[in-house]
Structures are given as structure tokens and as C-alpha cells.
Image: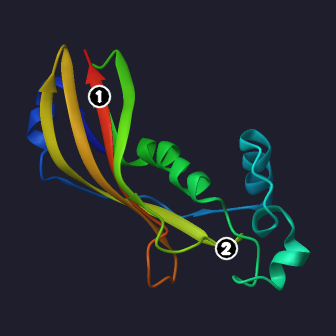
Amino acid sequence: MTTTITYERLGDLAGTDLGHTEYRTVTQDQVDLFADATDDHQWIHVDPERARTGPFGAPIAHGFLTLSLAVPFWTELLEVKGVTTKVNYGLDKVRFPAPVVVGARVRMRATVAEVVEVRGGYQIAVDQTIEIEGGTKPAVVARGLYRFYA
């Protein structure tokens, strides 16, 4: 469910649980494209045959690929009206507690930790967790920093 708020009300978001997104399946095609984009062709990602005998029993997504899914997940969680510019400002405390096996389904859960005014806008710090369906540990835990300008 998407939380919709106006730019003027962004300051009220601190402490808001934004809930979770729908699940998405991580595919080998995504992993291969990410490997090409980042020039990271390690066999645990791109060689399904060899990966079956590796430490995870299957190919796994790059940690940074899983982290990058936060971008499309955001469109499911938060819509800010009256904004002319949105900027990914950075990340704090990024961890990859569990690998995502190709074919697994993941979703993101997010809570707005704080909102601060910055020159010409607002910055929100969001505790975001990318969960693996049926997993006991999350794939990614991070605090995202996002800026919004009217």
C-alpha cells in the first residue's frame, strides 16, 4: 500500500511505518545484466551449473543488485506530491545478512526514522529491509537517505 503525502507534510513522516511492498522474483537475466553493467562476473552469480555445487547451492544475486531493488520498491511505498526533484542522497549502515538465490522472491519493508530540513528541502532517513520470502534473515538492511525539493 502506497503512503501518499504532500511536500508540505513531509516533516510529519518521522516514525511512520510504510509497510512492505509486493514480492518480486530475482531472475538470472537480472543477475547477468547486473554483472555486465558492473563488470562483476564472479561464477557464484553468472555460472548456474558451477554455482549448483558452490556454497549456496545455486547462483546468487549480487548484494548491490539486491540493494538496487530499493529503487523500484520505493514507487510502491511512498509518493510525495508537490515535489519537483527527488534525490538519492546516500546510504548508512548497509549490510547483506543473507544471499538471494536466483528465483527467490524479495520485498522491502520500510520505516521513516527521521526527517530533517535541509537547504531548500527535506531529507528523510529510512530504515529499509529487503526480505527474502521464507527466509530467516533479511537480504539487505540499510538506512537510505533521500532528499525532496519543491
Identify whether 54 is placed above or below 26.
below
**Lateral position of residue 24 relative to residue 45, left or right:** left
Distance between the alpha carbons at the discs numbered 1 and 2: 32 Å
Residue pictured at 88% horizontal, 77% vertical: 50
Report crowding for label 2: few under 14, some 14 to 19, many 20 or more residues within 10 A (C-alpha).
many
> Which of the 4 image quadrants contains residue 8?
top left
Asked if one can make out residue 23 in the rendered structure from this viewpoint, the answer is yes
Secondary structure, mark 1, is: strand
Q: x, y percentage for residue 135?
A: 50, 82
Residue 140 drawn at (x, y percent): 45, 63
User: At label 1, which amino acid type do we have?
Assistant: Arg
> Can you identify the residue that label 1 sits on?
147
- Disc 2 is placed on an element classified as loop
Which disc number belongs to residue 101? 2
Residue sitting farthest toward the left: 12
Q: Residues within 10 Å of mark 1 (few under 14, many from 20)?
A: many
Vertical side of 46 occupied by 92: above or below: above
Using residue 54 as the reference point, say whether residue 11 is left or right of it. Answer: left
Q: Along the polypeptide, which appears first: circle 1 or circle 2?
A: 2
Q: Mark 1–mark 2 contact, CB under 8 Å?
A: no
- Amino acid marked by disc 2: Val
Nearer to the camera, 55 or 61: 55
**Relative horizontal placement of residue 32, taking residue 70 as reference (left or right):** right
